[in-house]
Image (cartoon, rainbow, N blue to C red):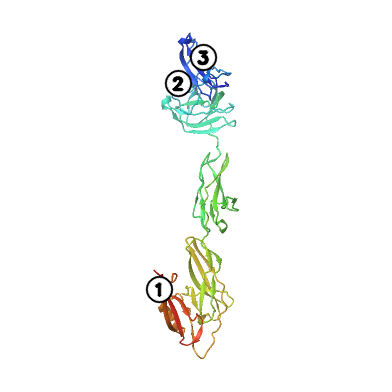
Amino acid sequence: MSTCDSDFDTLLGVYTGGAVNALTEVAANDDACGLRSSVSFQAVQGATYRIAIDGLNAVIGTFELLVSLAPANDDFANAEAISGESGSVAGTTVGASRQPGEPDYLEASVWYRWTAPSNGWATFELCGSGFYAPVHAFTGATLETLQLADTWYSYCADDASRITITATEGVTYSIPVSAYEGTGDFTLKWNRNPPPPEPPYNNVEPTITGTPREGSTLTGSDGEWYGTPPFSFTYAWWRCNASDDCNRIDGATARSYTATHGDVGSRLYIQVTATNEAGSDYAFSYGTAVVRSRGPSVTSPPAVNGVPRVGIYLDASPGVWTGLPPIQYAYQWQQCDAAGNACRDLANETASVLEVQRAHVGSRLRVVVTASNVDGSVSAVSEPTAVVPQPKVTQTARCVVPNVRGMSLLSAKARIRRGRCVTGSIRRKYSGSVRRGRVIAQTPRAGARLRRGAKVNLVLSKGRKR
């Protein structure tokens, strides 16, 4: 009995007895269906029942009392037997109740019992019934020992319920049809068909492995998919900038993708589409970290400072670079032909300073600077110098002041001597950037041509002032 279609908050009670002061309660309820009421009880043939309907807190209104007898197979013990490889049976959940001890997810349900005549698939469905009512399959002789069978759940074209199990010959299966958001009449059908193919749907998203850096290869996984196998997969890579503007990357349709310079500063995603005979669906991975450059980027190229003449020292400027600090620089001097082509490395010339030799006459010189940080290494090349001319022949050897800045005192003296000069005064001062014992400054300037034996005065670093 229920007042579920009434227009106010009801109270419902069922009693036996011949006088108001001698009533015995059989069942009572408040709010079984929203603010309305519903009761179920075992009726005794020939007995008279008194039904009381009231409003909560004396509220009044119009009520509708629905009275229905429970189906004969309402309880598990009274399950209706069905048999054979296939068949159908009409049933109803109208008036059904939830029996104590039934699984919690069953609402008002009716029960059927089927014993498998052979091994194989078995499908039970309510197709064509016009409303949704869940169907399940259990093994077990009592409510307390029920075990849910391995079940494939699917739906009919009208969204009615369908299940498929792998049946074992001689095993008895209990099949409840449960009410869900209302009751109604249905037709339960069974056959030995396999489960219909189910389109894919994603359970675990795809993932991306690899380092998100320019030039590195990233690889996506398929993720985990439910549905009816086999599946085929297609892939698409996406690039999203810092503003979350995303674009599909043209031509990136393989499972792996090599990050390009155009990806630097963006995040990458992979879209995986799974397809089977029943349809297709897609899922996206989470984004990578922001793609970094393969190494430092040069914004101003290296340069060679100095006049390319025999005996002169050329200084290399590394240029201007950007990237994650610290950035370290390595140098390699090269000798090119008079047109600035066919350049080759000069052996052992890997300092930032190069002394021009007679072997360089008729050539151009340039420097290759390699900048390195945690992301990698990148090289850039300076413009070549002018052609190194033949040195002028003079009757008297002269002092050509070498560039000794940054050298130790011993090395500086040796280079001054080779320049036909002599070491003059030596002073020392503190320096925050030049190591102790290294030349900070010199006079005269490097490249000056003086009389033979001219003095070159030096200033040495005393290191940081403590």
Residue 41 seen: no
User: 304 and 182: which one is in front?
Assistant: 304
Residue 77: which numbered mark, if any? 2
Looking at this rendering, what residue extends furthest in the top direction? 18
Q: Count the labels in the image.
A: 3
Between marks 3 and 1, how big is the CA–CA gap? 109 Å
Earlier residue among tags 2 and 1: 2
Marks 3, 1: nearer the viewer: 1
Three-letter amino acid code at disc 2? Answer: Ala
Task: Please tell me how crowded label 3 is: few (under 14), some (14-19), or many (20+) other residues with Cα within 10 Å.
Answer: some
Above/below status of 146 relative to 357: above
- Label 2 and label 3: CA atoms lie apart by 28 Å
Near mark 1 (Cα within 10 A), the count class, few <14, some 14-19 or many ≥20, is: some
* Residue identified by numbered label 3: 51
Q: Give 146 or 208, whichever is nearer the viewer.
A: 208
Question: Which quarter of the figure is the C terminus placed in?
Answer: bottom left
Looking at the rendered structure, the kind of residue marked 1 is Lys
Q: Nearer the viewer, residue 348 or 171?
A: 348
Q: Secondary structure at mark 1?
A: loop
Residue lying at 54% horizontally and 43% vertically, measured from the top left: 231
The answer for how far apart the CA atoms under marks 2 and 1 are is 102 Å
Q: Is residue 224 above or below residue 100?
A: below
**Residue 336 at x, y percent in the picture:** 55, 75
Q: Nearer the viewer, mark 2 or mark 3?
A: 3
Tag 3 secondary structure: strand
Task: Tell me the kind of residue under disc 3.
Answer: Ile
Local secondary structure at mark 2: helix
Residue that appears at 53% across and 68% down: 319
**Which residue is outermost to the left?**
466
User: Mark 1 sits on what residue?
Assistant: 462
| Residue 350 point in image, percent of width and height | 47, 73
